[in-house]
Structure formats: C-alpha cells, structure tokens
Amino acid sequence: MSLYAENKKRVAMNIDALAHIAYNLRVDVLRATTAADSGHPTSCLSAADIAAVLFFHTLNYDITNPQSTNNDRFILSKGHAAPLLFAVYKELGVISDEDFMRMRTINSVLEGHPTPRFDYIDVATGSLGMGLANGVGMALHARRTHKGFKTFVLLGDGELAEGSVWEAAALAVYYKLGNLIAVVDVNYLGQHGPTMHERDIKTLEQKFTAFGWQVYVVDGHSLNDLVVTFDRIQQLGHEKPVIVLAKTVKGYGVVSIEGKNGYHGKAFSAEELPAILEQLKKRFYQATWDGDKQPCCHVVKKQCDANKRTLSAPSFIAKTPPYRVGEHVALRQAFGNAIVEAGAGMDTLICLDADVGNSTFVDLFARKFSDRFIECFIAEQAMVSIAAGVAALGDTVLLATFGAFLTRAFDQLRMAAIGRLPLHVVGTHAGTDVGQDGPSQMALEDIALFCSLPQSVVLCPCDAVSCHNLVTLALNYSTGISYVRVIRGLAPIIYENNAQFKVGGFNVLCSSPDDSAVIIAAGICVHEALEAYTQLKKQGISVAVVDLYSIKPIDSARLRDVVKNAHSRVVSVEDHYAHGGLGAAVCQALVGMPITYKQLAVFDVPHSAPGEQLRSLMAINAQAIVESVRHF
Amino acid sequence: MSLYAENKKRVAMNIDALAHIAYNLRVDVLRATTAADSGHPTSCLSAADIAAVLFFHTLNYDITNPQSTNNDRFILSKGHAAPLLFAVYKELGVISDEDFMRMRTINSVLEGHPTPRFDYIDVATGSLGMGLANGVGMALHARRTHKGFKTFVLLGDGELAEGSVWEAAALAVYYKLGNLIAVVDVNYLGQHGPTMHERDIKTLEQKFTAFGWQVYVVDGHSLNDLVVTFDRIQQLGHEKPVIVLAKTVKGYGVVSIEGKNGYHGKAFSAEELPAILEQLKKRFYQATWDGDKQPCCHVVKKQCDANKRTLSAPSFIAKTPPYRVGEHVALRQAFGNAIVEAGAGMDTLICLDADVGNSTFVDLFARKFSDRFIECFIAEQAMVSIAAGVAALGDTVLLATFGAFLTRAFDQLRMAAIGRLPLHVVGTHAGTDVGQDGPSQMALEDIALFCSLPQSVVLCPCDAVSCHNLVTLALNYSTGISYVRVIRGLAPIIYENNAQFKVGGFNVLCSSPDDSAVIIAAGICVHEALEAYTQLKKQGISVAVVDLYSIKPIDSARLRDVVKNAHSRVVSVEDHYAHGGLGAAVCQALVGMPITYKQLAVFDVPHSAPGEQLRSLMAINAQAIVESVRHF
C-alpha cells in the first residue's frame, strides 16, 4: 500500500485530523511568507482546507516516487499559493522545516510560484489561467496510456476571467475527460479588488454547467463537505469533467483580515506574526488535538535536486529524404512527411493542431496516428498548455499552426520554457510569402519571439530536404523549446538528399576566392539570394551565399571566417520584421568585425499581394540583393 | 435623412429586395475570389444573408461619412469573409466594380482580411476571436461619450473556441453593454473539419445565456427571420448585450458544395465559375427581380486613400517633474503621477487595467478619472482588444499590466500594429528585479516582443524623472505602439528635473577624455553601471556610461561617436534575455564598427530571489560590469 493510501486510510473521515493538518498548513504558510518577507499568504489561507482534504484524503499518490506514472497529478493553477503547496509537502515529510523556511531564497527550489525545479511539480504555473489546459493534457495522456490516475487542478476564481480557462473547459468536455477534476478556490477577491463575479457563485455554476461540466458547490472551509464531495466524485466514473466551486474567504483563519481587500500578496511582518498566529490558534485550536505539529506521515526527507528532471529525450534517426534537386515541393509537405516518419519511429510522439491541420500538413500525421493526435480547434493557448501537460508526463510533443497564430500563445510558450518542457513547435505560413491573405496571417515576428526564449533553438528550412532534416533535428532537441519556421509556398529543392545539417550550423551554398560580398539568408530568401548570385555572376560579380538555417544558435566563429573571405561585405536578407530576426542574429554574431553591412528585411506592415510582388515591394528579393551588392 | 436611413425605408420589410442584394453579394464574392485566385468564398456565402439584412436594413450609418461619430459600427471578427464586406460596400456604391475586382492585389486597399487601409474598416481582423472585445471597447466608448450608436460584431462559430471571445463575453455583461450586438454565423464547419460544437446550437445558446447574454437563435438564411429578429433587438433597450446565433450553411447557394467539408479558403477557378454562378442563379433568381445588378443606393464613389486615417495624435506637454536627485522613488509611482497629470490635460485619455492597478499604480488614475478607467480583470487579451476598439474611435488609450503578462496578448498587440492603432502600453515589474516572485512574473522578453512590432517605440526609464518624461513622450507618439518598460522596485533619482529626453535619444551620464570603455545600460542596470563606474574610478579606470533609454528607435550615429571616444570598447548590460533586447539593439546600431564588445544579459531562466542577488547570479550587476571592463 502506498503511503498516500495508508494516509488516506488513517485519516479517512477523521475530520479532526484534517482540521489539524489544515491548521498546520496555515501556520506554516504564515511563518514562511513572513520569513521571506513576500508571498501571498491570504491566497493560501483560503485554499488551506481544500489542500488538506485533497492531499490527505483524496489523492492517490506514492509520495516516495513523484514521477510514478500511477500517481494522481496535482496542478496549482493559482500558482501564487505556492507556499501552501510547499507546506503540504512539508507536512508530508518531503521537505524539512529548514528547507521549507528557506523558500524564495536563491538556492531553494521552492520558488515564489511553482516550477519543476522542485521535483514534485510537473508544470510551472504563476501566469494565471493555464493550469486547466495543462490538466487536459495530462488527462488525455492518462487515457491514451490506459492509466487510472486522475488529474486535479486547483484554480482561483480571479483567473476564471482568463479566456484560456474557457478554451480548456470546452476541450475537456469535447474529449469527455471524466478523469479531470477542477477545484476553484472562490474567495471573491482578486489582487486589485473584488473578482468579476464577486459572490455570485450561481453564475459561475451556470457557466460551467453550460460548458458541460459536472458542478458541485461546496463550503470550501467545511472539511466535511469537501470530504463528502470528493468521495462522491471519486465514485462517479462518468465522462464529464468535474468542477468543485468551493466558497472560501481570503485570509481565512486570520480574523482581522478575513475577506478584506488590500491584503493580496502581502506578507505579515515579523513583528505582526505572533499576534496573527495567536488569532489563528484561537480560531482553530481544539483541546482534543495532540498539540504537536509533526507531519502526519513519516517518510524519509527527499533531497530535491535542482534541474534533475529528465524529460523526453528522443534520439530519432530519420531516413534519408526522398526528394530530387530542382523539384518544386511545399515545405509543409516535407514537414508532414517527416513527422509521419518520426511517428512511426517514436511511439510517444504526439501532435497537436488548432484547426489548420490541412494547411500545416499535420493532417498526414493525424490520419496515420489518430490516437496520438489532439485537435484543439481554434484555441492556440489551450494547444500549447495541453502540449505542456502531455510533455510533462514524458511524451514527445509537437504542435503546429500558422506561425502568426503562435503569437496568441506566447505566454504559454514562455511558461513552458520556464518549466523546461521541450516542446517542438512548427510555425507554417511564415513571412510575406503568405501573400494575398494579408498581414494578419503572416508570421513576421516569430523568429524574434522564439529566439527570446531561454534555451530555445530556431531553425528555418528553405527546401524540402532541409525541412526534413531540421524537423528531425528539432525533434531530437530536448533541452528547451525548438521552433521550425516553414513557408507556405512551393520551393525548388536545392539540397541533395545526403546534405548535412546540425543545430547551430549553416551551409555555404556558393563561394569562390573572388567573392566581393556574402549574402546571408534563410527560408524563402535563400532562393532570392541564389537568384541574385546568378544575376551578379552575369555582371561579373562573385558573391558567397550562406543558408543560415540555424538562427539560434549560430556558429559565430565560422560565420566570421566566411565573411572575412568575402571582403567583409555582408547583406542579410529575411522575410521577417527588421528587429529580432536573422539580421539581428547576424549583427550579434559579427559584432566588432569591421564589416560593411546591409540589412534587407520587412520594415513596415505588408499588404495583401502575391508573395513574389511583396518581396519586391519590401525589397527582400533578388533585385534588392543585387542592388545592395552593387552599391556597397 | 442619411442614405442608410433612406435605404432602410426603401427596403423596409421588402424581403425580395434583400434577397436580390444577398444574391448580388454572393455573385460578387464568387467573381472576386476567382479573380484573385484566393480567398474564402464559402465563408462569405454562409454570411451573405446576414450581411444583406445588417447593412441594408438594420445599421444606422451615413455611408458618405464613415468616420461619423454617430454611425453604428460594424466589426467583421471572422475577417476571412472580407470579400463579403467589400461586396457590401460595392453594393452600397462606395467601391466601383473595377476596384472591387482588384481586391487582394498589391495596390488595393481591399486586403485578404480587413485592415483600416480601407476607410470603412475600424480595426484589423483576421486573427480570430478578437472582434467581440474590439466591440466591447467601442460600446464602452459610445456610453462614455453619450452617443446612441450601436456596435455590431459578426463572428464565425469556429472562433468561439478562442478564449478571447469568452473574456469579451464576460466583460460585455459586466459592463451591461446593451448597445453591443453580436451575430454568429454558425455554419458548423471550421477550416480543418467540423467545429467543436458542430450542429449542437443548443449548447452554444446555453453558454451565452449562462454568460448573461440575451440570445436569439435564427435561421441565418431566412431574411424574414433576420429582419424580424434585428427589429426586435433594436427595440430592446435593456442592459444585456445581445447575441444572434444564426444557423447557416457553409457555401450556401452553391448546391454542389453546400455544407461540405474541404472547401474552406478555396476559390473557384475561372473555368468552374460560370457553372457555379449558374447554380446560384437557379437557386435564387426570381422573375420578379428587375434583373440588373446595380447598387441599390447610389453614392459618389469615394476614393479610399491608403494610410489616410489619422487617429488620436495628442500633443500633451507635461509639467516639469517634482522629484529630487538622490531620492528613492518607485518608477511605478512616477508613472502613476505622470498619467494623472496627463489625464488632467487630455480629456480623451483612457486607461485600462487587468486587475493589477494597485501594483502598476494605474490606480492613481482610476481614482481620479473613474469614468475614463476600464477594469478588465485578469483578461489581458480582452484588455488589449478593448483598448484597440476604444483607440479606433479616436481616444488616447493607455494600458498597463506586468510586462510579463503582456506576452499573453501579443497577438492582439500585433493586430493593433497592423491596424495602425497607437496604443500606449506600459509594462511594469520588468526583469529579474521582480525578485522573489520568480520567473513567471518577470518580463524578460518584453523588449524583444515590442521591438519586433513595426512602427513601435520602446522606452526604458531608470528613475522617476526619466519615467515621467518617457511616459509623456510615449503618450505623444501616435504613429504606432509605444512601450514603456518600468521596473518594480525603488530607484535613486539620478536626473535633474529639467533633464531632456526624446524618442530615439540617449544620455551620456559619465564621460571623460580618458575613458577606456563605455557601458551601455537601461532601466535598473543604469544604476549598476553607475556603481561600476565608481568602483572602476577607484581603481583608476575611467569609463563612459550611457543611459540608452530609447531602445527603439536608437540614435546609431551618435552612439557610434560615443563608442569611438571610449576606445571602442563596449559593455552592454540589461535585465532581459540575451536575444532581442538592449544588447541586440546595440549590436545592430554598432554593426561594422571594429569594437570589442561584451554582452551582459540574462542567459537562462532565473530563480526566485531578491533582485540584487539575482543580478549578481545572472552577472548583470556592477561587479560583473567591473570584471568585464577589467578583462577587456
């Protein structure tokens, strides 16, 4: 029997024991936030009874083995209540009081908001409204892998204003996730003032009911209500996700501030603390308790090692691609082919879509591996957070949509990066190449976005062969988020099938001892550069052409050599806005070199027009390159 | 009487006339998309009857004066139905058939998805799910300015999966916007396949009802139903926003593809077109029609001038700030003071918050000008789209939240940039200075994001005086989005109150003829640079210090001079990730100069810890600067 099961048995319906635990949690939350001189104690106090019941009564969890694939999962979507979660783990004996009291200090893995640096956390939270979609991902993983675990998500009521919650709420019902249980700590107060619904829990109930959830409304400070409700939920076994709306009071237990506005994110001072704890004691202390504050289960303290987590690190070797030089192939087609091949080679590869699978060609994967395909409809934020939830449980996860629409989920991508989840992201329809559909559909800031993420790699194929290779490299990259940027249109294949690619590499497509300049390009602009090369050649001007397919990281030393050998004259050309893209990366790589440099990029919002005309209008085409070289 | 009113009278309940118009719209949509060889005809066909009734029966609109403040507003949230909207304006006589047929070509203002390059469009749409929040902004503007116009938003059912729709839906009810009318073209088909709800309109009805909307379900191809319903809505006058769920069929009118999957975003070929039009004719043509396809109202064709729109261009002159050198003041406090002053000077200044007004100090404005303050709760996407809606009607709009959470609304910011809306954005709690709350709360990619937007300016104050000045400069910037990055903590004031600032400027804080290097910093790092300056001075090393408060644009020529005068040795230091921030801007500005350069920046995800310790850990503090200079 697991320790959790033992625990569960021990406390069973022993409400007194749970009350004691909840009291301990409250005391610890107050002690630790005062010690840290920061944190959100009042947001913890409202949820303390919920946490006590969930962790000491409801959850099935082997506390000695947090990575066990049979454990129920718990996500603290209201991440600012982190001290409460850490207090739970202290109470469970996982964390010593000494470690607990050092939360929020530089060497502690117990951060201000939960991150997976602490082993017992699966996903980073703290930007609100993402936990439910993370939970959808985990619940889908449970179903696919035929595991019986349930996923519990604790939300605040303030974060219900985030649309991402409703994306997840809709998808949980669509996917009939009866193994997903959400609990909302409805304490009626946000940071700035009352929440949108204040005490109108009826409307919240109607909203979730209309979205298709099984809703329970309980007194979130009645341990008995909570125990009975969670017991009932455990027996349901139906296809509806369940949500418990727990009516609570912010700051509950500290009578002087209970339910009062203006105490969000405020720790009590060391001077105030004794009186505060005294209030708490008066409110809760019962003579029948044994009075000690020992953890109720005794497990060996586990040292939580920073950055120890190892997630999916696939080593997938793709076959040589089957293309022919000169053939015109859509890169999206090559991408689709590559993930079908990867799907056959890796049975934990999961792909997600946001209703554009026929455009991104993720459809090819979906048709072949329907059990490993997740359609998220037009809900990009949910797509990324669901992907994060799936990835956190060890699957290799790829998601694809138009690059432009990844901007919709950038906060979710940022949080995945903080959580060190190796998401594999593909953005199609990159740049002005989208053409007539116009600027709203064009990814023109995507390189800037993905480069900004820590530990990310950003790869830009220019033909089907490089696309095949770069998608494969991306799938093998597991220390951060990988991004592959794919254009919409057809492109002639320039690489032989045995061409070599590596993260941080680039290929010199043309060079001679007479080169008077080097053109550095990626994606569609490689073809413009090659055309410029040909035109310049005819005019007796020799230039080098570099396919800088790896924009981050970049092989700076080698690039400098190439530039030196081309009279230190450089033209960079990109189908991306002028800031944060290929040109910026080139400038950073070549900083300090005495070069003459011209940046060709998109400097203003483009129009609707065929891609070729736009490249001309934006001066990122062969002619613009030729003129740049001729006028050095 | 306006032409619209005339029109309305003329067609009144004349369903035949509306049927004729709807037929004309369908014919034109098909002709134009075939001519463009692209576009989304089937998504237009499903909404043609709705458009006919709205524009030729319901809306109050002076067609000769699109900017009139009395006009009802119309937002095409399902932006891919742009050809339908343009067909309406052709039918209204605003666009000639020749111009209409040139849509999606390079010199046309009729783009693939609507943009305000065409005068009759207020906000750019095309990234789905934003129109409803734009409409909330317009409806709030109407209420504040005591205008009687109504705002109509046409959505697709696919985009209801976007959480941003539900953010707006909740806020419309919270603000009791009875002057907001949404219509959903429920055609059951997305791009990739059926929508999430398919034909289950009952659930959609329940969802909007639970959210507090007045819901009508109609046959979206029954002109009679539509007319009756919109007439009824016009008479309501209550406080509930109204939504019409119109059951439609994708591709309606072209029998061979009606309601069939696989025809999203596909134009018919020139060869197919005659047979398609023949199907349409058979389906709709009645002998009673006069058979001509002339517009039903005849106004002089209006030349729509590209980029003609002039929105709010305030010229607000702030008073000299009231601070004292050496005093420690939170920049947020200075920001709050500055907008209170601006609010007094500009009666069209509107501020928006997302439940962190007490942290950003937007509260100071809210308390003084409650009628010009919009609380969006924890819904950053809605905040930006509402701001866009308000700005599109001419107000000066500032929105503020933690810089980290602006990532949540980057797609909305991107669309505002495409729509050329001069939003004034302030992101507080920038960088690791956030400290113990941890990485989820730290804006570390915000400079990269805002620099990537076309026509944006990015300003980083380091003390209260510069904050006061830069917020004022930002409020006066009207050709694009301005971003002011504000740190959380206190900072000593280094500037005299009469110090000068300009967009594209920087200040040399220390310099001498003996400088062996220049330290370029912004924000909190300016203080680290000044501390490094002092320490180096003691060691007999003289350096220049630059406060690069304007990161975009950047005065490259002058910066090069400063660098030359400091032995061409440069250290840049920033509390931002290494890509796309100050360092990248410096590299782009100094490209080609033979300099020795070191970049101090945040290279990996930070921890929870006090800001000062984090700056040490991340090597962006005075000590790191000193060591960089000493080891050049």
Image (cartoon, coloured by chain):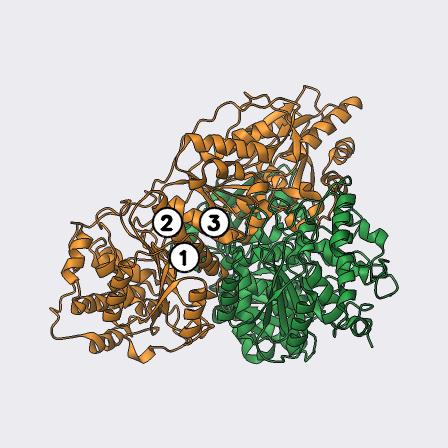
Chain colours: A green, B orange
Q: Nearer the viewer, residue A323 or B559?
A: B559
Query: Does residue B579 appear in this view?
Result: yes
The image position of residue A147, as x and y in percent, is 70, 78
Q: CA distance from mark 2 to mark 3?
A: 13 Å
Question: Can you see residue A393?
Answer: no
Q: Pointer 3 indicates a residue of which chain?
A: B
- State whether residue B126 is above or below residue A324: above
- Lower sequence index among marks 2 and 3: 2
Q: Pointer 2: residues within 10 angstroms few (<14), some, or many (20+)?
A: many
Q: CA distance from mark 1 to mark 2?
A: 10 Å
Q: Residue at x 74, y 45 (%)?
A: B609
Q: Name the residue carrying label 2.
A: B138
Instruction: Farthest residue to the front: give it.
Output: A287
Q: Amino acid at mark 3?
A: Val
Which residue is at the front of the view, B36 or B521? B521
For this rendering, which residue is in front, A267 or B570?
A: A267
What secondary structure is marked by label 2? Answer: helix
- Image location of residue A55, percent across then percent down: 74, 66
Pointer 1 local density, CA inside 10 Å: few below 14, some 14–19, many at least 20: many
The answer to whether dots 1 and 2 both sit on one chain is yes
Amino acid tagged 1: Leu
Q: Residue at x 73, y 28 (%)?
A: B531
Res A566 quadrant in image: top right
What residue is shown with label 3?
B384
Q: Chain of mark 2?
A: B
Chain ID, mark 1: B
x then y, percent, for residue A4 = 79, 71
| Position in image of residue A383 (x %, y %) | 56, 65
Q: Which residue is mark 1?
A: B132
